[in-house]
Image (cartoon, coloured by chain):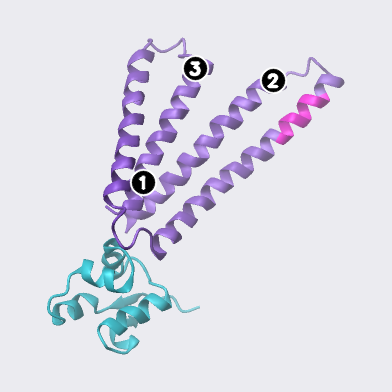
Amino acid sequence: MIDGNLQNNIRKLRFLKNEMTQQELADNVGVTRQTINAIEAAKYSPSLVLAFKIAAIFELPLEEVFKYT
Amino acid sequence: MSKQEILSWTSLSTSTSVLVFYILINFGWPDVVPDYSDKFVSIFFNVFWIAVAIEAFVQISEGKKKVQKDERDFMIEAKGLKVGYGILTLTLMAALIQLFIYNFTQNIAPEFPFTIELSTIIHVLFILLFSASAAKRVTMIYYYRKD
């Protein structure tokens, strides 16, 4: 079994997208701000649907937002 | 702190308070410890009503928000429920075994030393019901704090 970590660029992408706040991103994808914070800190792995929703907000493919290392 | 985390804290406080009241009413204050029951009751009475007030305030103030509960909240709640359910199952099994022993000893050997009274079994079940609820909330708080 491969055992790795789900890393992400959400913090950087938020900054590049007019310094979007965690709350704005959370509202756009339908979760709480705390969940976005946990995802950013790589403490919580989002569901596939949520991951796709986040990628869609940044208009990027999934692999450019999340990386499994 | 998210709404669900605050609700976990308030629920833990109310469960603990009810548990303390129930134990004090039914079993009284232990003889080996100096009697602080009045202070104890006063503290937990305040804890109970403060928790209820916070819960009501959170429900009203956060009720307007778009997202009340998301996938992470559901996942954490599931972990809490798993722990609570485990405790309840073990308790129920222990109570059923005790009931069996109680019936058995009442009919065959009334002097059997390990028999627990029926009323005690009911008290223990009630206490463990609230303990399971508290354990569920403690587990949830642990996972909220961990993240």
The residue that disc 1 covers is B7
Query: Both on one chain, marks 3 and 1?
Result: yes
Front residue of A24/A4: it is A24
Few, some or many C-alpha atoms within 10 Å of disc 2 (few <14, some 14-19, many ≥20)?
few
Query: Which residues lie in the magenta part?
Result: B96-104
Q: Is residue B102 magenta?
A: yes
Given the image, on which type of amino acid does mark 3 rest? Ile
Q: Is residue A38 above or below residue A18?
A: above
Q: Are marks 3 and 1 in contact (CB under 8 Å)?
A: no
> Can you tell which of label 1 and label 2 is closer to the viewer?
1
Q: Is residue A54 magenta?
A: no
Few, some or many C-alpha atoms within 10 Å of disc 1 (few <14, some 14-19, many ≥20)?
many
Earlier sequence position, callout 3 versus callout 1: 1
Q: Which chain is purple?
A: B
Q: Measuring 31% from the left and 69% from the top, which residue is drawn there?
A: A39
Earlier sequence position, callout 2 versus callout 3: 3
Say the numbered circle drawn on residue B25: 3
Q: Is residue B87 above or below residue A51?
A: above
Q: Measuring 53% from the left and 46% from the top, which residue is drawn there?
A: B84
The residue that disc 2 covers is B117
Q: Colour of chain A?
A: cyan
Given the image, on which type of amino acid does mark 1 rest? Leu
Q: Are marks 2 and 3 in contact (CB under 8 Å)?
A: no
Q: Is residue A3 left or right of residue A26?
A: right
Q: Quadrant of residue A46?
A: bottom left
